[in-house]
Image: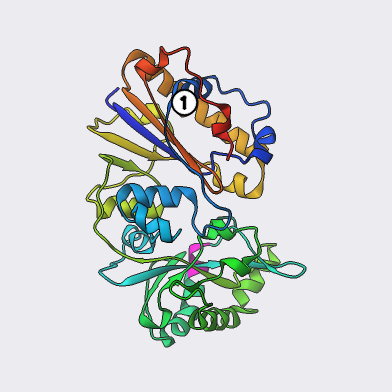
Amino acid sequence: MPVHDLHLLLPFALPSAADAATALHGLESAALDRLLARATLEERVIGEDFQRTRPHERWIARRFGAVTPADQRYSDDAPLAPFMLLADGGTPGDALWACIEPVHVRIAHDHLVLIDPDTLGVHTEEARKLLEIARPVIEDLGVTLQAPTPLRWYVSGEPLGALAGASPLRATGRNIEIWLPHEARTGERSRAWMKLQNEVQMAWFEHPLNLERESRGLPAINSIWLHGQGAMRPVQSPFARVMSAAAATRGLALAAGVKPSLPPESLAALAQDDAQGTTLVELDPFSAPFIEQDWARWNASLKALEAAWFAPALDALTNGALSRLSLTLCGDTGSVTLSVTRSDLRKFWRRLVAALFIE
């Protein structure tokens, strides 16, 4: 097997202590269990409940040097928008960019709740129509707009200032009040952003497109969400190959001079290509079930990874085809990174505490 050093990044692979018993109930994962039992703990990051970015976003930004440990000592933001813009085919240059996504905000009893954007089923043509309506509103604010893809738009300009916004998945399912963009320097709510958001909401209100969506039982696209603001900075890739569907990861790779590709369905498919150095594969079957607390589907996803990745990786380590396997398992606020080698498999006395699966 040509891949000698493999690193798997697994967002939302760590259930909380409260959910672990349900998430792992009935799970048979002999290969993963053995890998975890023999692994060495390389890093454990304990996050906080109100950080505005997800652990895997902060991890990937840190590994490529888009943020430094000193940066994250004072801010939990991961300035990923310019790298996402690069991955989507735009031109970030040296400007400060933020990503805007069309979303649905649901009215609860006494607050507003953000719905996971990936579950909205927005078609490309719908997104284009929404952008046509929103574009003049956005540009009237005096900001530059790039929209290389229908579902992710990017804005830059002095009127927006330096905004700190929350990742959509950080705010999904929660009261959005504390997650709305604010001025990074002062902590105050951004008047410019509130004005822009309100005007876009009014422009989309009762639009025929949304009325048609609601007739099909789909949520209306009734607001916009801003996140990831930052400027490009020089980055370096610690990985020879990067395989991911995430725009942020792909953009960081491109900025570091590594051409990314989509992850294969299994380790066997990955083994068809020669590679020198470490290969990073980001696998994300867990996000939707984790956010929705659908632990049966989360459990099924882990079983699928056991067959496609963990069991083949254990075999490859055992026969020497794979020299090292690293796993970065992320949860709602924290992450752990583990590594295991062929020689580690023979250390039968080593047992990694099961609590690594629990934040």
Report the residue at 40% width, 56% height from top. Answer: 72
Question: Number of numbered discs present?
Answer: 1
Does the magenta stretch mainly form a helix, a strand or a loop? helix
The answer to whether 26 is drawn above or below residue 329 in the figure is above
Identify the image quadrant of residue 303. top right
Image x and y of residue 113, in percent: 66, 64
- Residue that numbered label 1 is attached to: 310
The answer to whether 221 is drawn above or below residue 278 in the figure is below
Residue 115 sits inside the magenta stretch: no
Name the quarter where the C terminus is drawn: top right
Q: Is residue 201 left or right of residue 249?
A: right
Nearest the camera: 40 or 311?
40
Q: Residues within 10 Å of mark 1 (few under 14, many from 20)?
A: many
Identify the amino acid type marked 1.
Phe
Identify the image quadrant of residue 354. top right
The answer to whether 54 is drawn above or below residue 230 in the figure is above
- Label 1's element? helix
Report the residue at 62% width, 69% height from top. Answer: 177
Report the residue at 44% width, 84% height from top. Answer: 136
Image x and y of residue 29, in percent: 56, 23
Q: Is residue 26 left or right of residue 52?
A: right
- The range drawn in magenta is 123-127
Q: How is the image coloured?
A: rainbow
Nearest the camera: 156 or 165?
165
Name the quarter where the N terminus is drawn: top left
Image x and y of residue 150, in percent: 44, 66
Image x and y of residue 40, in percent: 42, 26
